[in-house]
Image (cartoon, coloured by chain):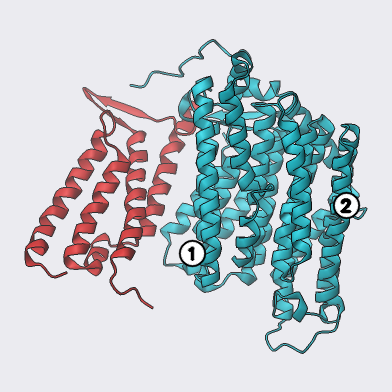
Chain colours: A red, B cyan
């Protein structure tokens, strides 16, 4: 597809969706949202890029292979469970720190892991589907 | 920390291995190294768990610091620890065999992450103490298994995976419905908690339907009659390393789930399940073995034999006396080793003779006497010839069904044993004994890693056969724990299951 309008807008939309997906990821801690939805939204951003500028452009933008992204997310999620083992003897028992109203903890690392895993998984799927001529 | 969390590592290690291997997607050498380390570490972790359970009884951990009925628990009693340990052994043996069998193309398609992901699913299913979590591990297993089945990207594999996927997705769906019904009645999904709550709820139609749905869902996974037909339609299309680990482990996860659910949550005794299970067991044995008799492809013969052997395990559950359950557990352990080994042998036969079709192979006894000798061990064991492990397994199951007043089941089991020997004789006569029709250009020597993996599993079979005593004793104590799960429940819920339980800690 070669549409100038879509192509010009896609950069803007891509950036917007990525930012919103990160916000959704962060707000998922106490409100609706989270790593899964955020990851889906980010993947949709890359999908728009792939539709407008071609799959190669989208792949370049991801930089690493989508499966590697998935693996990295899973590693991060597993690692986020380890601190709980140290002081509370329970895997995935999360650490927290507070600063006034703001609080965060290792649960956020878990959610980022989910975000990356979902993003990688969906990208591995849709980038392959969008390729018009898969290599023989 | 290492010991207290022994239940965690057999799942966490393969999961981490799969994740790290996926991170190195385009670097095969790194993937291989990670995979090797993962296999060895997991094997060690499962042995550690087995040792820990033997030394200190049932092990349980709770995730996220949430106390038992609210959080997800992982539990290892003697049965599940043994299953995890045998998974470790299988992972090691098939990985060793895979050194000579897995092609670069398959590695590039993601063999290592999928293989370890599947192992994580299998161990997760063995160790989880939560029935919804069991469903999740079933899904992990299903997805990774589908990936492994099509890893060669051939037309036959796509055909096989379609049958596999449709039936198994259906089975997990049924399983999920059963879980939903169970939750509606009991309000809990923790298996130990269910064991406490359900007797108070009393019998109801919902529970009966839930039990039957569970039997149906697990039955498809395990390959019980009449739901087994996907198995011989798909397993033979997979590459042999993959087929071996599938044959050894995947159906047995279904059997394990049946053993767990129908001892801990539901009972076979006095619920009308026994009659259904008995008929299913008998038909599974007979249909499997008859199906095998007409096949000529080694892998298809072996696939049908998985089905017939599953019948013996189900027989143990149908009779449901402690002795019968012990026989069933012993049978599962014996069968995993033997069946995976036979599939590995099928791969070696293919390597040595260039074909899976028995009619066209032959002469292997002269060309490769070591392979012939190694074939005899699992083949005779599967047929139940003393002093190999299969003899003790069959003896325990059949003896228990006579004592349990199910003489006709014992008779069916004996007939099936003889017919099994017929199939094994057929493979022996055709592939090893007879002269080859013509010298095949594709025939090659069997590589050392293949022989080493086969020899390792054969040695285990012989060891179980000659030193049956500790294994039988272990199976009996594991069965005793299934019949009387008070230790299991106490380990999960704490000594006194508090009314309503206590929140571990309020979230900030």
In the image, residue B80 lies at what x, y percent?
67, 38
Give the Cα separation between the discs numbered 1 and 2: 50 Å
Which residue is at a point 44% across and 29% down the rendered structure image?
Answer: A93
**Whole-percent x, y for residue B322 in the image:** 81, 30
Count of all numbered marks drawn on residues in the image? 2
| Mark 1 secondary-structure assignment | helix
Residue B14 in view in this figure: no
Would you place residue B103 above or below residue B317 in this image?
below
Q: Quadrant of residue A79?
A: top left
Q: Is residue A80 above or below residue B307?
A: above
Crowd band around label 2 with a 10 angstrom C-alpha radius: few (<14), some (14–19), many (20+):
some
Return the chain for callout 2.
B
Q: Which numbered circle lies on residue B444?
A: none
In the rendered image, the quadrant that contains the N terminus of chain A is bottom left
First in sequence, mark 1 or 2: give its number.
Answer: 1
Q: Residues within 10 Å of mark 1 (few under 14, many from 20)?
A: some
Q: Residue at x 82, y 30 (%)?
A: B321
Q: Residue at x 60, y 67 (%)?
A: B237
SS state under label 2: helix
B486 vs B418, left or right, is left
Position of A101 compared to B412: left or right? left
**Residue, disc 1:** B30
Q: Residue B500 location in percent, x, y?
A: 50, 12
Quarter-of-image position of residue B77: top right
- Dot 1 and dot 2 residues touching (CB under 8 Å): no
Asked if residue B412 is positioned above or below residue B491 in the image, the reply reads below
Quadrant in the picture for the C terminus of chain A: bottom left
Q: Position of residue B110 (x, y in %)?
A: 48, 63
User: Can residue B281 be seen here?
Assistant: yes
For the point 76% across and 47% down, which residue is it? B283
Q: In this figure, which residue is indicated by the disc labeled 2?
A: B415
């Amino acid at each position: 597809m070669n549409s100038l309008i879509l192509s010009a807008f896609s950069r803007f939309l891509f950036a917007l969706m990525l930012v919103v997906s990160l916000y959704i990821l962060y707000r998922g801690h106490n409100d609706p949202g989270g790593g899964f939805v955020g990851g889906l939204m980010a993947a949709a951003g890359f999908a728009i890029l792939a539709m407008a500028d071609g799959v190669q452009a989208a792949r370049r933008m991801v930089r690493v292979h989508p499966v590697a992204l998935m693996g990295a997310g899973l590693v991060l999620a597993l690692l986020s469970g380890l601190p709980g083992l140290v002081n509370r003897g329970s895997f995935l028992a999360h650490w927290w720190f507070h600063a006034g109203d703001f609080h965060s903890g290792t649960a956020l690392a878990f959610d980022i892991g989910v975000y990356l895993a979902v993003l990688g998984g969906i990208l591995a799927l849709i980038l392959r589907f969008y390729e018009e001529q898969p290599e023989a | 920390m290492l010991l207290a969390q022994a239940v965690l590592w057999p799942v966490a290690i393969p999961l981490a291995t799969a994740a790290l291997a996926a991170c190195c997607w385009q670097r095969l050498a790194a993937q291989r190294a990670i995979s090797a380390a993962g296999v060895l570490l997991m094997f060690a972790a499962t042995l550690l768990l087995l040792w820990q359970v033997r030394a200190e009884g049932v092990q349980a951990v709770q995730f996220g610091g949430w106390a038992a009925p609210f959080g997800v628990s992982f539990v290892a009693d003697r049965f599940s620890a043994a299953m995890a340990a045998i998974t470790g052994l299988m992972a090691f043996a098939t990985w060793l065999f895979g050194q000579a069998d897995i092609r670069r193309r398959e590695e590039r398609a993601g063999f290592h992450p999928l293989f370890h992901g599947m192992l994580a699913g299998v161990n997760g299913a063995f160790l989880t103490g939560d029935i919804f979590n069991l469903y999740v591990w079933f899904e992990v297993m299903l997805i990774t298994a589908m990936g492994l089945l099509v890893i060669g990207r051939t037309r036959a594999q796509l055909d096989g995976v379609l049958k596999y996927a449709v039936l198994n997705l259906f089975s997990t769906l049924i399983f999920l419905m059963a879980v939903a019904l169970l939750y509606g009645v009991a309000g809990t999904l923790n298996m130990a908690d269910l064991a406490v709550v359900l007797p108070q709820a009393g019998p109801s139609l919902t529970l009966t339907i839930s039990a039957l749905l569970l039997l149906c869902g697990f039955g498809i996974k395990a390959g019980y009659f009449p739901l087994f037909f996907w198995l011989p339609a798909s397993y033979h299309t997979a590459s042999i390393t993959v087929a071996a680990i599938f044959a050894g482990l995947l159906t047995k996860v279904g059997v394990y789930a049946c053993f767990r659910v129908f001892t801990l949550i539901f009972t076979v005794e006095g619920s009308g399940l026994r009659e259904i299970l008995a008929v299913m067991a008998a038909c599974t044995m007979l249909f499997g073995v008859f199906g095998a008799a007409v096949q000529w492809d080694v892998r298809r013969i072996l696939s049908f034999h998985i089905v017939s052997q599953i019948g013996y395990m189900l027989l143990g559950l149908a009779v449901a006396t402690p002795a019968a359950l012990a026989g069933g557990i012993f049978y599962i352990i014996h069968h995993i080793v033997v069946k995976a080994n036979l599939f590995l042998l099928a791969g070696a036969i293919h390597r040595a003779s260039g074909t899976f079709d028995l009619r066209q192979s032959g002469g292997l006894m002269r060309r490769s006497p070591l392979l012939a000798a190694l074939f005899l061990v699992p083949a005779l064991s599967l047929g139940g010839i003393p002093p190999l492990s299969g003899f003790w397994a069959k003896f325990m199951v059949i003896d228990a069904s006579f004592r349990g007043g199910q003489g006709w089941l014992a008779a069916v089991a004996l007939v099936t044993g003889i017919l099994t020997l017929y199939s094994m004789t057929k493979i022996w006569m055709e592939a090893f004994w007879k002269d080859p029709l013509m010298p095949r250009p594709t025939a090659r020597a069997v590589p050392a890693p293949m022989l080493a993996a086969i020899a390792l599993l054969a040695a285990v079979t012989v060891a179980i056969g000659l030193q049956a005593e500790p294994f039988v004793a272990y199976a009996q104590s594991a069965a005793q724990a299934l019949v009387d799960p008070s230790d299991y429940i106490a380990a999960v819920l704490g000594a006194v299951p508090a009314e309503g339980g206590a929140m571990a800690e309020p979230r900030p």
